[in-house]
Image: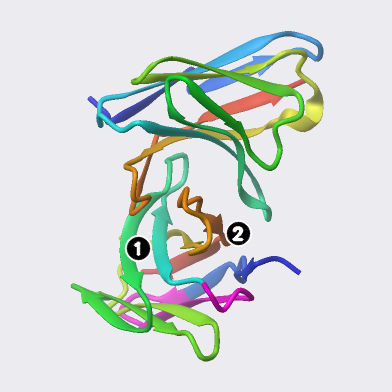
Amino acid sequence: DADVTQTPRNRITKTGKRIMLECSQTKGHDRMYWYRQDPGLGLRLIYYSFDVKDINKGEISDGYSVSRQAQAKFSLSLESAIPNQTALYFCATSGSSGSGYTFGSGTRLTVV
Amino acid sequence: QKEVEQDPGPLSVPEGAIVSLNCTYSNSAFQYFMWYRQYSRKGPELLMYTYSSGNKEDGRFTAQVDKSSKYISLFIRDSQPSDSATYLCAMIPPQDSNYQLIWGAGTKLIIKP
């Protein structure tokens, strides 16, 4: 099994719908992250969590929310999806030194 | 101006060539530098990790840091079609005790058989 598992792999949803992307990890890391990747813009941080009780906004958190249900689980929600949220979404984990991130395989989200 | 600049490419080279991938950065205080490789429809994976200036070699890959020029490079020797991927550089600013990575946008590399 993968160290970081994201579900679903692909999702098409309609404008205005609420959608949740899920992430689970077996690395035993405390730190978890949600990134968005768009062509030419690279990876942009949406939210990050350093432990179950710690949630922080990244550079592009508007329109998104997260929940850290357990050390191993971190979910991302789009409360009311809009077309410009169409992107590739990645969950990642890291140890406390930040020396290396482990990424999931991503969720390709299309909002129509 | 972005903190980290990286040419998006694509960079297309023949198999067996030496590849040079580069990033420039604006914050002279950066000390930790990483290269990630991302295959299509996959998440990035850590390829090389260096601290401060100098070279680090791992097989066909060499990471080089020139802090005086604020420039980092990744060299790939004897390039293979399996090296075709997007390569992202990442850095950690030392004043950020949370070790949040600053990412380049990635360079798409194509190795032609």
Q: Can you give x and y, in whole percent of width and height, for residue B76 in the image? A: 33, 76
Query: What amino acid type is highlighted by mark number 1?
Result: Asp
B63 to A42, vertically: above or below = below
Q: Which residues are magenta?
A: B13-29
Q: Chain of mark 2?
A: B
Query: Which quarter of the figure has residue B111?
Result: bottom left
The residue beneath circle 2 is B105
Q: Mark 2: which amino acid?
A: Ala
Chain under disc 1: B
Residue B10 sits inside the magenta stretch: no
Mark positioned earlier in the residue sequence (2 or 1):
1
Circle 2 — which element?
loop
Q: Quadrant of the N terminus of chain A?
A: top left
Callout 1: SS: helix
Q: Residue A87, how many percent across, how many down?
A: 65, 34
Quick check: marks 2 and 1 in contact, CB under 8 Å? no
Q: Residue furthest top?
A: A17
What residue is pinned by disc 1?
B83
Q: Nearer the viewer, residue B107 or B70?
A: B70
